[in-house]
């Protein structure tokens, strides 16, 4: 299997969390800004409508409504134009956070990759790997269960290496099954941070486009709302613990 190597800097779990937190905060600022701008639009609409109700130019109701709509359209355009720089700046800020965040899928896309990095350079991993060098399927299955039961990541990494060396038909479990059973905190949190960051990015982009276009896409809005309900926002409260055992 040929793999293309790319120059993507590796980030720790806490660094990924900071990017996700930044997107979460930016998402909130975008919504508040658009809410303020929409409030300005609504106020101008109401003022224009009220003023045209009082204009005495011997106009029909249809004519009053048409003139009010024309003035309202122009007023909304002025508000949107005046806010262009402020709103467009959010795109740049979002991209600066989102691009390095999603690039980390390369390192955290599977529990196997995360487990393979555990205890690199650790003498315990080397000792375990030496002890397991001649282990057969039954013995490897037991040590795999022992690693899962004791949360011993150094042993788990050694089991994974030995597992990879066995023919597929002799493996007591697949690498992904084993790595998933290890319930690696780094993988679980990084995956959740990526979900939070991606949804917050999509949410602010939808909000900005909705504002610029002057209309909403109910399908996109509903989809984001439903996916947001599946997020575990509590992980943003524990960033200080995410670097444990994750030194490069």
Image (cartoon, helix red, strand yellow):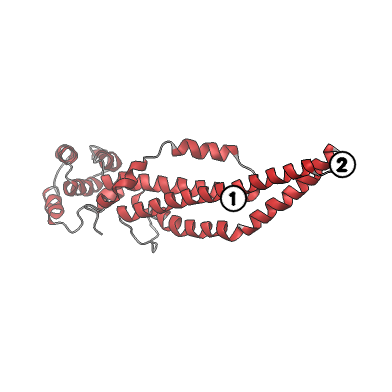
Q: Residue at x 81, y 42 (%)?
A: 64
Whether residue 89 sits left or right of residue 231 in the image: it is right
Whether residue 11 sits left or right of residue 65 in the image: it is left
Whether residue 42 sits left or right of residue 25 in the image: it is right
Residue labelled with disc 2? 59
Q: Secondary structure at mark 1?
A: helix
Quarter occupied by residue 174: top left
The 10 Å Cα crowd at callout 2, few under 14, some 14 to 19, many 20 or more, is: few
Nearer the observer, 48 or 164: 48
Q: Residue at x 34, y 50 (%)?
A: 108
Q: Secondary structure at mark 2?
A: loop
Residue 214 in view (yes/no): no
Q: Residue at x 21, y 52 (%)?
A: 245
Residue labelled with disc 1? 37
**Residue 182: percent from left, percent from top:** 24, 41
Which of the two discs, 1 and 2, sits closer to the camera? 2
Count of picture labels: 2
**Answer yes or no: do the residues labelled 1 and 2 have beta carbons within 8 Å?**
no
Q: Residue furthest right?
A: 58
Nearer the observer, 211 or 222: 211
Mark before the other along the chain sequence, 1 or 2: 1
Residue 40 in view (yes/no): yes
**Distance from the alpha carbon under mark 1 to that under mark 2:** 32 Å
**Residue 10: percent from left, percent from top:** 33, 59
Quadrant where the C terminus sits is bottom left
Q: Residue furthest bottom?
A: 7
Q: Which disc number belongs to residue 64? A: none
Q: Residue at x 21, y 49 (%)?
A: 157
Quarter occupied by residue 183: top left
The 10 Å Cα crowd at callout 1, few under 14, some 14 to 19, many 20 or more, is: some
């Amino acid at each position: 299997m040929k793999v293309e190597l790319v120059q993507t800097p590796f980030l720790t779990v806490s660094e990924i969390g900071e990017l996700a937190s930044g997107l979460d905060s930016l998402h909130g600022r975008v919504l508040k800004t658009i809410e303020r701008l929409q409030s300005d639009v609504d106020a101008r609409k109401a003022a224009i409508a009220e003023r045209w109700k009082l204009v005495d130019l011997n106009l029909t109701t249809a004519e009053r409504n048409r003139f009010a709509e024309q003035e309202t359209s122009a007023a909304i355009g002025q508000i949107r134009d005046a806010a262009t720089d402020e709103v467009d700046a959010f795109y740049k800020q979002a991209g600066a956070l989102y691009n390095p965040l999603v690039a980390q899928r390369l390192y955290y896309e599977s529990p196997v990759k995360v487990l393979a990095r555990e205890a690199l350079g650790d003498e315990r991993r080397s000792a375990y790997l030496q002890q397991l060098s001649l282990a057969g399927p039954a013995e490897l299955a037991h040590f795999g269960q022992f690693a899962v039961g004791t949360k011993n990541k150094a042993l788990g990494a050694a089991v994974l290496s030995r597992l990879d060396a066995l023919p597929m038909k002799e493996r007591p479990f697949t690498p992904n099954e084993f790595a998933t059973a290890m319930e690696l905190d780094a993988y679980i949190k990084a995956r959740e941070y990526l979900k939070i960051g991606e949804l917050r990015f999509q949410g602010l982009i939808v909000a900005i486009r909705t504002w610029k276009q002057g209309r909403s896409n109910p399908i996109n809005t509903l989809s984001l709302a439903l996916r947001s309900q599946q997020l575990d926002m509590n992980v943003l409260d524990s960033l200080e613990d995410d670097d444990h055992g994750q030194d490069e």
